Structures are given as structure tokens and as C-alpha cells.
Image (spheres, helix red, strand yellow):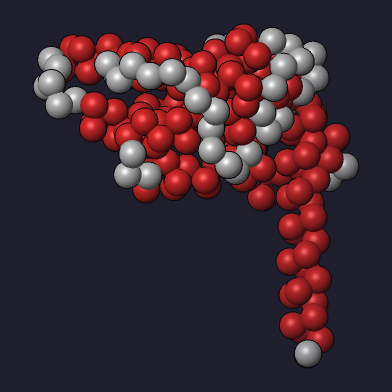
Amino acid sequence: MSPRQYNLGKRSAQIEQSRRQVLDAARAILGEAEGYTGFTLDAVAKRADVARATVYYQFGSKTGLLEAVCDDLAAVGGLSELVKAFTDPEPLGALSEFIACFARFWAADRAAMRRLRALAALDVDVHAVISARDERRREGLAVLSAPFSDGNPAPADLDGQLRILLALTSFETFDTMAGPDGDLLEVVPVIAGMAATVLGAHREPTAPRG
């Protein structure tokens, strides 16, 4: 290995390490009681023990950092497993898997998730990030709801169903139903049963697979 290749590799490792420090610092601040007002780029840089310019260089803006934090939570929470829901040929099984995936995602860092979503009501940057991701969840629910629409419900009914499903699969619903110290996965069967009822597919709730 040439000195240039070695230096490039070392530099890349340093960048990745500082990125990890910033993401961990951001999540830690979001998980604290004062996370509502304490989440600034300066505060994150100080907690991560890096220069403010480093945060700007790697993430570009507060919105960019928030996007990265959400991506990190998605990776930790196994949101990539959603593919199982969209490849399951059994509609109710697919819906249950989708709900279980989001239970794992919401549980990835519950304290940070709670602050992040609460902050969305107070900060326009956070609101933009969270709203975009909630819209992706709504789009996923629309796809999984399609097999239940054989009766051709009116568009207004479809919109109403999706709004209810979006509420049922939200962090706030899981957080409330599980209680402060409860396991979010334990409420999956109940939420899946409620979602099935909304779609007109009544069944007894069952535990998620896997």
C-alpha cells in the first residue's frame, strides 16, 4: 500500500469516526429532558467533541443532521426488514409484518424518538423531516391496504382508512399503548387486529412472526 492510499484510508476512518460521534451526540441530546431546546448544531458539536465546522461539513445543515439521525435510527431499528411485508403474498400477514417492523423501529431509541417527534411540533426543520417520513409510511400502508379494497370503497373512505392506519402505526400510539416501560412489540397483535378491523378483515390478533 502506498503512503497516499494509507493516508486516504486513515482519513476516511477518521471521517467515519467523527460522523459516528456526531450521530451519537445528536441522539443523546434528543433523549434528554431539555432536548426540545438543546438540539442545536453547536450543542451537538460540543457533545461530540468536534468542531462546529465538522458538523456542517458532514451534514450540511440542521435538517441534514436530522435526516442522518433518522436514517441511523432506521438502520438500528431494522426498518430494512420492511421488504418482508411487501413480499408477503398473504395480505393480513403482510400488514402484521409491517406493523411489527415499525414497532422495532420505534423501539430503537425510544427516548430520542419521543423527543424528536415532539420537537416536530415546535421546530419547522424537524417537522419537515418527520412529515416526509410519515408520508412514506402512509404510502406503504396504501400499498398494503390495496388487497382489501375489493369492495371498491369511495375515495373518501380510503382516505379515512389510511388516516386511521397512520395513527395506529404511529410512535405515539405504540408509546401510549405499551406504557412508559412496556415492550412495544407486545402491542403489535392488538394494533394489527385493530388495523385489520379498519380494513374490514376481522380476525383475532396474532403475534408477529420472527
Tell me where residue 16 appears, x and y as whole percent.
74, 57
What is the quadrant of residue 70 in the picture? top right
Name the residue rendered at 73%, 50% in the picture: 19
Q: In the picture shown, does residue 41 fall above or below 188?
A: below
Q: How many numbered dots are placed on residues in this image? A: 0
Q: In the picture shown, does residue 144 fall above or below 14?
A: above
What is the quadrant of residue 30 in the picture? top right
Q: Is residue 37 visible?
A: no
Name the residue rendered at 73%, 66% in the picture: 12
In this view of the protein, which residue sits in the foreground, 24 or 142?
142
Tell me where residue 69 appears, x and y as whole percent.
64, 37
Question: In the displayed structure, does residue 166 sit left or right of residue 181?
Answer: left
Q: In the picture shown, does residue 183 fall above or below 78?
A: above
Tell me where residue 132 appears, x and y as whole percent.
43, 30
Q: Is residue 59 visible?
A: yes
Question: In the displayed structure, does residue 88 sit left or right of residue 147?
Answer: right
Which residue is at the far front? 204
Q: Quadrant of the C terminus?
A: top right
Q: In the picture shown, does residue 126 fall above or below 200?
A: below
Tell me where residue 176 appears, x and y as whole percent.
62, 9
Question: In the displayed structure, does residue 71 sit left or right of residue 48?
Answer: left
Q: Quadrant of the N terminus?
A: bottom right
In this view of the protein, which residue sits in the foreground, 177 or 39?
177
Question: In the displayed structure, does residue 87 sit left or right of residue 120?
Answer: left
Name the residue rendered at 78%, 90% in the picture: 2
Which residue is at the far bottom? 2
